Structure formats: structure tokens, C-alpha cells
Image: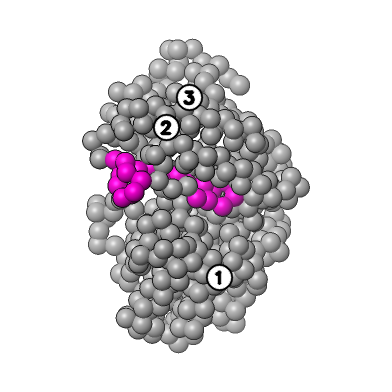
Amino acid sequence: MTTYTQQEIDQLKMSALQHLWIYQREPSEMAEKGGPPVFVGGTDCHVTDIEGNSYLDCMSGLWLKNVGYGRTEIADAAYQQMLELTYMPAGSTAVPTVKLAEKLAEITPGDLGRCFFTSGGSESVETALKIARAYQRRVGEAGRYRIISRRGSYHGATYGAMSLGGMPSAPRIDYEPLMPGAVHVAQPNPYRCEFGGETPDECGIRCANAVEDLIKFYGPQTVAAVIAEPIASPPGVAVPGDTYWPALRDICTRHGVLLIADEVITGFGRTGRMFACEHWGITPDIMTVAKGITSGYIPMGAAITRKEIADVFVGSEDASFRHIITFGGHPVAAAAALRNIQIMEDEELPQNADEVGSYLLDGLRELYARHESIGDVRGKGLMCGVEVVKDRATKENFPSHVKLGDRLTGMFRQNGLLLRGGDAMNIAPPLCATRDDIDEIVTVMDSVFTDLESELL
């Protein structure tokens, strides 16, 4: 690992402040805190910054470092492909791209089997929206243009994807008006169920029925698709009751509405299954993937369709799907993805996520029992959430002036954890996490919440 002098560190940080737009960070605020942080290395679940400090990454980068940091096997696969072919002539493909599509057809649920490759999650969602609308036209349903999504979900940063879901932490007012036909419905979050469901299953069925009510309100002949994350990823994680997904699948089928499962975050072992849809035994019409497909070693994503959907675009030039992503199916990215998936299978990382994730959830439940500021804990696999409240009985959040998010994030960082604090938090370390890693996470969280409560309660 390269070492840097203090002068070089200062110059790099100043250059970043002058020339970079860093996601969700404002330059003057970063400068006041001595930032931005610059990282130079990583192994398994830990990363090292330019000043030599080591941290346990509790968010897997951005939900994507599934096989962990430092996997030279993936770098070697990408390098070998670079020596052979780095791009393909227009209208053609490459060997690793074909093999990756075949592999995804093998491991995804049901008859999902044709891939449109992209460069990442937002593009995958954008592609799925276009497939859904184009499909409805191909089958004589040109009036179906509405897309139903859920409040509190995040589906990406491109224009169409941004029009879906919606979270207070990602305001969209600068970009309005948004995509026509985007309508929103309740998130099946049992802890804060909009319809007053008292159990996860009751909340799930009420939220699924709300989707059907919305389809009927606008008229099925106007609705192209419903898009939803199997487990919602916004702060805190929302795990639906077991009634939700089977009911949603049935509703979409009965009304001729395509069901899009956004597995950009949940896919590739994150929830203890290769894909989260497997928890409920359903097959969506379109599945979007990215992030874990390469564990973030190189940009890659895909929209994967069932054969019945894909076949509508076969037969003539007029029937073809008119859509292009320049770097979609890039052979180097495909080679990296294949090696990444092989590591997951060889090392049984989805199974590890299931087992170690259960251990994490048990640890979070112990924290819940000890700390009144923890209102709820939930999760599947290594996708867990904690809700932080001022009053557990009323579920009241802390007031904004206490700056809970900044306060917690700083406290975690001082104790060696990269974990974003706030009213609701996500804990999602790499799938190679061990019980020792989980013990470290829970021990630090215990200490931090003890300090927090001494200050604020």
C-alpha cells in the first residue's frame, strides 16, 4: 500500500474540495471537518484511509462490497480479459458477456432468462421502465403508461428512476416536474404501517391491497408496471410481512400489470438467498440487478426479463427493443462478474450472510433490550436496520436540532465503524463478515448508544 506524506495528503484533500462533486456531501462542510476522507486500501470487511486509520465498513461501500475488499481474483479476471478484448464491434457481443447472461439465467428465479446489461443500478431501473412500457405497446396496450412505486423506496438517480419512490433524504424538488405517470403507494413497513396493521402479515396484506386499489382507481388499462424492492433499502430497512409479495404477484398477474423486482441492493446474497425474491417463492416479470453482481469491483448491472416478456420483442425489426447503453455488457465487467459470482458460490457467501446475519440480528435485539433509544430492529441476512427514537412508546424521533445523524456517525467513526447514523440506520457489512466482525459492530454500537442516551435522554 502506498504511503503519503502529510503535504501530499493535504494537497489531495484540497484538490478534491476544488474539483470533485462527492455524493451527498457539501464542500465547505467537508473542509470544516478536515475532509473529505480519502481511502487507499481494504481487506475483507475493513478499509484503511490515507492517514493509516482502519475501519470496519458496516455499509459494504454502498451496499455492494458483497465478497469483501481485496479480492485479487476479480482483478485478475478483469486484467486477463483486458489483454484479450476490451470492447466489441457494434451489434455483436463477447464470450464473457454471453457466459454471464447464461449464468444469470441459471441462478435467477423461475424463467427469468434474458439480460439487458447496463452500467449500474439506475440504468437497470431505467431500462426496466422502458421495457415495461414498450412491452405493453407490443401487446396492444399502448394506454398502459403508469408506473406504481412505493413511498420511501430508492430506485436510482436518473430521471425516470428518481421519479419513483421518494425519501426525505433525497429531495427531488430541483428536478420537478418528474416523469409523467409515476404514482406512489404505501411502503409495507410493519413498524410504521400506514394502514395500522398490527402484525407484519396484516400490514403486508393491507399494503398489497392498496396497490390493487390504486390500479382500480386509475384503471388497469393505464398501468404498465409495479416496481418494488423485495426488502426496502432506505434508512432502517423495511422487511415486509410474508403475505405481501405473494399477494402483490397475484394482483399484478390478474390485472395484466408487469411486476418489477428491484434487486439492485438485495441481489447476490445480501439477504441470505442469492435473490431476495426467493424468500417468498415468487418470480417477477423483470428483475433489476447491479452492485453485488461485481461486488463493486467494476460498474455493471442488468435488467433481466422472463422469457414470455422477452419473446414479445423477437420476430421482426419493428418488434425489437430500441434501447442502447454504451457500456452495457462490457466484456471486462462481465469477466469480473463471473469471477465474483463464482467466489460467492464457492465460499457459500449467501449461506454465510444468512447465518452471520441471524447472529447480527440477535445482537441488535440485545441492544434493543438495553437501550430505550432503539425503537425497533429488523432484517434478513446481512441487511439489518435499527430505528432510533426519542420515545419508544410514541415512536417519536429526536428533534432535528440535535443533529442525530451527524452525532451518531461521528461517534461510530471515532470507534472504528463506518456506519451512517440517523433516525433509521442500515447495518450491511460484506457477506464475508465473521462473528468476530459482528461482535465488534455490536460492542461499538452498545457503547455509542450508552453515550448518546446519557447526553440526550
Of helix, strand and loop, which one carries label 1? loop
In three-dimensional space, the C-alpha distance between marks 3 and 1, rounded to whole angstroms, equals 42 Å
In the image, 424: left or right of 270?
Answer: left
Q: Quadrant of residue 196?
A: bottom left
Q: Quadrant of residue 242?
A: bottom right
Q: Position of residue 419 (x, y in %)?
A: 46, 35
- Residue at 33 percent across and 23 percent down: it is 33
Residue at image mark 2 = 449
Return the mark for residue 284. Answer: 1
In three-dimensional space, the C-alpha distance between marks 2 and 1, rounded to whole angstroms, equals 40 Å
- Verify CB contact (< 8 Å) between mark 2 and mark 1: no
- The quarter of the image holding the N terminus is top right
Of helix, strand and loop, which one carries label 3? loop
At label 3, the amino acid type is Asn
Q: Mark 1 Cα within 10 Å, few/some/many (few <14, many 20+)?
A: many
Q: Can residue 258 be found in the magenta stretch?
A: no
Question: In this view of the protein, which residue sits in the foreground, 114 or 383?
Answer: 383
Where 38 sits versus 62, above or below? above
Q: Position of residue 207 (x, y in %)?
A: 41, 69
Q: Nearer the viewer, mark 3 or mark 1?
A: 3
Extent of the magenta region: 378-398
Question: In this view of the protein, which residue sits in the foreground, 338 or 165?
Answer: 165
Q: Nearer the viewer, mark 2 or mark 1?
A: 2
In the image, 122: left or right of 294?
Answer: left
Q: Position of residue 309 (x, y in %)?
A: 56, 77
How many numbered circles does the render carry? 3
Q: Quadrant of residue 165?
A: bottom left
- The quarter of the image holding the C terminus is top left
